[in-house]
Image (cartoon, rainbow, N blue to C red):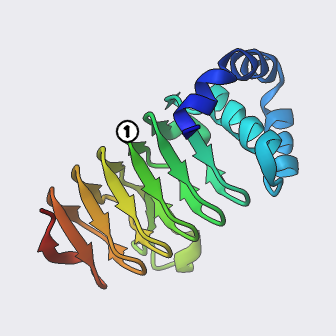
Amino acid sequence: MSGKEKFNKYIYIINTTSLLINLLPNILINRLWDFINNWNGKLGIVLRYCILKTNSKSCGENVFIGKNVYINCFENLSIGNNVSIHANSYIDASGNIYIGDNVSIAHSTSILSSDHTWDDKSLPIKYNKLSLKPVTIKSDVWVGCGVRILAGSFINKRVVIAAGAVVNKTIESNILAGGIPAKKIKLLE
């Protein structure tokens, strides 16, 4: 049975659980996420999805969030259908993140939508204002393990980002990109 078939089989339970979670105050929802974030198995997967569905800007169907995924600013995160974000990934949506349909994000990936500035020389850099820049990942994208996607990046549709790459700009459609910074390696045929 495919992930989508399993999702559809349990849609009533998922929707009911999401409605119940939505009744909780945000502080309890955040504590619940922290509590279940390292759970293996179906219960952890379902609860993480339900929390994401009730707290994000938008969340499609059949979304898998692996264990130990840290998400900052749920309310600025939009996720399409058939998306997987695997274990130990870090998502900072403070500047808005959009993830399209049929996207797979491998383990230990970071997606950042903010940068530190250093304009105020009277303050240490870490205390300067943040610069918020949205990140867009279009549909049919595979992000390899350990990739870093930096603020302001735009990944077009049907792209593979090689493991360990650092994305800091626009990546064109239908390519394999890799390296630091990520650049076109070859066309996908």
Q: Is residue 183 above or below residue 88?
A: below
Quarter in which the C terminus is drawn: bottom left
Residue 185 shows up from this direction: yes
Q: Residue at x 51, y 39 (%)?
A: 76
Q: Which residue is mark 1?
A: 101
Q: Secondary structure at mark 1?
A: loop
Residue 63 percent location from the top left of the image: 56, 39
Q: Give the amino acid at mark 1.
A: Asp
Q: For this rendering, which residue is in front, 50 or 110?
A: 50
Q: For this rendering, which residue is in front, 64 or 134?
A: 64
Q: Is residue 96 above or below residue 154?
A: above
- Residue furthest out toward the bottom: 180
In the figure, is residue 21 to the left or right of 181? right
- Within the image, what quadrant is residue 166 found in? bottom left
Q: Residue at x 47, y 59 (%)?
A: 105
Q: Is residue 69 above or below residue 119?
A: above
In the figure, is residue 173 to the left or right of 121? left
Q: Residue at x 61, y 29 (%)?
A: 7
Residue 123 shows up from this direction: no
In the figure, is residue 112 to the left or right of 56? left
Residue 75 percent location from the top left of the image: 57, 35
In the figure, is residue 140 to the left or right of 27? left
Residue 101 percent location from the top left of the image: 37, 39
Quarter in which the N terminus is drawn: top right
